[in-house]
Image: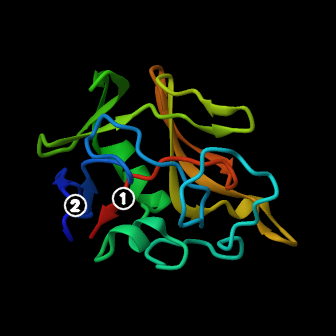
């Protein structure tokens, strides 16, 4: 789609998952890291960052806030929380390595698969948890953390060798993005 490869995992939604992260040229590469709502990559956490997405429940597909749509165009976008939940509930997950990086091979109901590298995320001290944990932004705001200045957290897919779950994370911490398309 628009020059970027995808895999149909056979999910009930029919969603297509990109074969690699934004900024990567292969599935095993980490790619670039983004604060949620930012359209330029970042290699450091910035607690003063106020996401322009702070008052929105979801930024999926918004070309001014969704880096997947802004950079890859067409129908590419950051996955929603529900789309990560579908991935967790309907796919088999195998901890493995690809191109020298740890992560999960996610196998869809039809037998097709994608690889999500354990790329970590950027903290104040620099890149943390790479090779041990994966943190991928969803486009969905965490409604439990809305304050006067808007959302302070967005939901993420988080995983390590022991398991996978949905978590919340401060939107000023740069994460990799794995685009999806309808």
Crowd around label 2: few <14 · some 14–19 · many ≥20 (10 Å): some
Q: Secondary structure at mark 2?
A: loop
**Horizontal placement of 62 versus 146: left or right?**
left
Please, is residue 167 above or below residue 152 in the view? above
Question: 18 or 110: which is nearer to us?
Answer: 18
Q: Residue under circle 2?
A: 4
Q: Using the rendered view, name the quadrant where residue 144 is placed.
A: bottom right
Q: Position of residue 55 (x, y in %)?
A: 71, 76
**Horizontal placement of 125 versus 65: left or right?**
right
For the C terminus, the quadrant is: bottom left
Q: Do residues under tags 1 and 2 come within 8 Å of each other at their CB atoms?
A: yes
Q: Residue under circle 1?
A: 179
Question: 33 or 141: which is nearer to us?
Answer: 33
Please, is residue 1 above or below residue 6 in the view? below
**Residue sitting at x 28%, y 77%:** 74
Q: CA distance from mark 1 to mark 2?
A: 10 Å
Q: Using the rendered view, name the quadrant where residue 148 is placed.
A: bottom right
Question: 161 or 63: which is nearer to us?
Answer: 63
**Residue sitting at x 34%, y 30%:** 104
**Residue sitting at x 38%, y 34%:** 117
Q: Position of residue 26 (x, y in %)?
A: 25, 42
């Amino acid at each position: 789609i628009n020059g970027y490869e995808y895999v149909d995992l056979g999910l009930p939604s029919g969603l297509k998952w990109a074969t690699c992260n934004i900024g990567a040229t292969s599935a095993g590469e980490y790619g670039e890291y983004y604060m949620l709502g930012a359209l330029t990559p970042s290699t450091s956490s910035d607690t003063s960052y106020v996401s322009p997405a702070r008052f929105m429940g979801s930024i999926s597909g918004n070309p001014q806030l969704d880096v997947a749509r802004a950079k890859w165009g067409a129908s590419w976008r950051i996955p929603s929380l529900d789309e990560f939940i579908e991935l967790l509930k309907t796919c088999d997950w195998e901890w493995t390595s690809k191109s020298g990086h740890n992560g999960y091979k996610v196998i869809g109901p039809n037998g097709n698969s994608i690889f999500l590298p354990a790329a970590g995320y950027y903290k104040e001290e620099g890149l943390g948890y790479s090779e041990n944990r994966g943190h991928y932004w969803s486009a969905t705001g965490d409604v439990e953390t809305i304050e006067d200045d808007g959302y302070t957290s967005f939901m993420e897919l988080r995983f390590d060798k022991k398991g996978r779950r949905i978590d919340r994370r401060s939107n000023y911490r740069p994460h990799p993005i794995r685009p999806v398309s309808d």
